[in-house]
Image (spheres, rainbow, N blue to C red):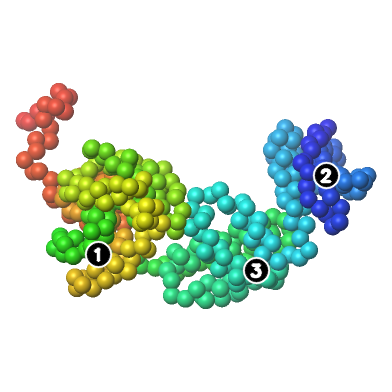
Amino acid sequence: MSLIVSGVKSPNKGDKKVTDIKASILNRSNRKHWYLRYQLFFENSDVEKHQEISTKVLKTEKTLKYMQTQYLPAWIAKKQNELLLQKFDNKKFSCFYEKYLIEHESNKGFFNRLPTYRKVLKYFGEFEVSKINRQMVKDFLFSLGDIKNDSKKKYLTCIKGILDIALDSDLITRNVAKDIAFAKETKEAINPFSGDEIALLLNNADQMLKNYLGIAFYTGMRSGEILGLMHGDILSDKISVKRSISRGNITSPKTMGSIRDIPIFESVKPFLREQIKQSSKSLYLFSQNGTNIDDVSFFRYRWRELLKACNIPYRTIYNTRHTFITAMLNSGKFKIMDIAAIVGHTSPQMIMTRYAGFIKENHLKIDTNLEIFSDSFGDNLKFKID
């Protein structure tokens, strides 16, 4: 019993164009595994290949229906991928890199990762995939210099993904980039700005940087989210966070939880009003020559110079977000769930883990005059004291 499934047209195999793949699942009564028969059809030619292979899937483990509806379409897709790769005259890393880009170009953050991808290509591009070994991958990671392991992992993810394509095509027998571990790094301690430092920075910054910092310190928004603000996103009582701008790319914010409305605290209103006035001829709240600012690096030089002028030890401009979150925690007036919602975390877990040192004493800031078992809790909370 079998089911014929046709594949779509595939690229060249050698100098012949594969126009179709047909395959079927076979039940050989004297065999314990399901079998598969396939045919390749070529342009202006009769069937060249008619082959039968074992799927190595036991009949006792999978039903015929499963093999026909699940296994067979997946096998055909893999076979089509093999044929696609056979169009290359060589098996260089660069060939598989191109396919990797096609598979990932619709992913969020793709354009931001392109510099990483290109550095991987520059190093490995001319090597045949079968010649790349584990030590070469480690040497590349070492060549990246003194960067954090989290950054090196992004390069490794790219290498693994590219070699996975070669592995799926049976051109290599294992992915040498897998299971490469990094030493656990101690996360850099959060060092928020003090109230006096914030006042000093805001009093000495030029107008656009001052407005940017005022919004950053008093909303906790990410850099790209602030640059992505349009005038229509600023309402009377809230800011709607809908987009992010980084390296010239306008995308949706980091996660689904990052698309949010946040309250406008009184402290941030003067900075919003002034920046709205300054950018009245642009769609975006922060703009240069009528167009949006394409990356927070626009402020980086002025930020370094501002810190020097104020005699404040260097911290990244992203520290404004850490400062906001720790201030919210230290106030003792906000639930962690509410803080997570305001800053765009999908759950409070990130805050509980990353800012644990600022949370541990907050339980002592509660109102001790609160009547815990008041009538509002219902009549069922009654205690009889003998």
Name the disc covering residue 191, or none. Answer: 1
Q: Residue furthest right?
A: 46
Q: Classify mark 1: helix, strand or loop.
A: loop
What distance separates the C-alpha of mark 2 from that of mark 3?
30 Å
Judging by the rendered image, the residue that carries numbered circle 2 is 19
* Quarter that holds the N terminus: top right
* Camera-side residue of 78 and 366: 78
Q: Going from the N terminus, do you reach mark 1 or mark 2 first?
A: 2
Which residue is found at the position 78% from the left and 43% from the top? 9
Query: Residue type at mark 2?
Result: Thr
Judged by depth in the image, the label closer to the viewer, 1 or 2, is: 2
Write down the residue under mark 3: 125
Q: Indicate the position of residue 177 as horizontal and vertical percent values.
A: 59, 65
Up-down: is 310 above or below 283? below
Q: Earlier in the sequence, mark 2 or mark 3?
A: 2
Amino acid type, label 1: Asn
Apparent side of residue 309 relative to residue 111 in the rendered image (left or right) = left
Crowd rating for badge 2 (residues with CA inside 10 Å; few <14, some 14–19, many 20+): some
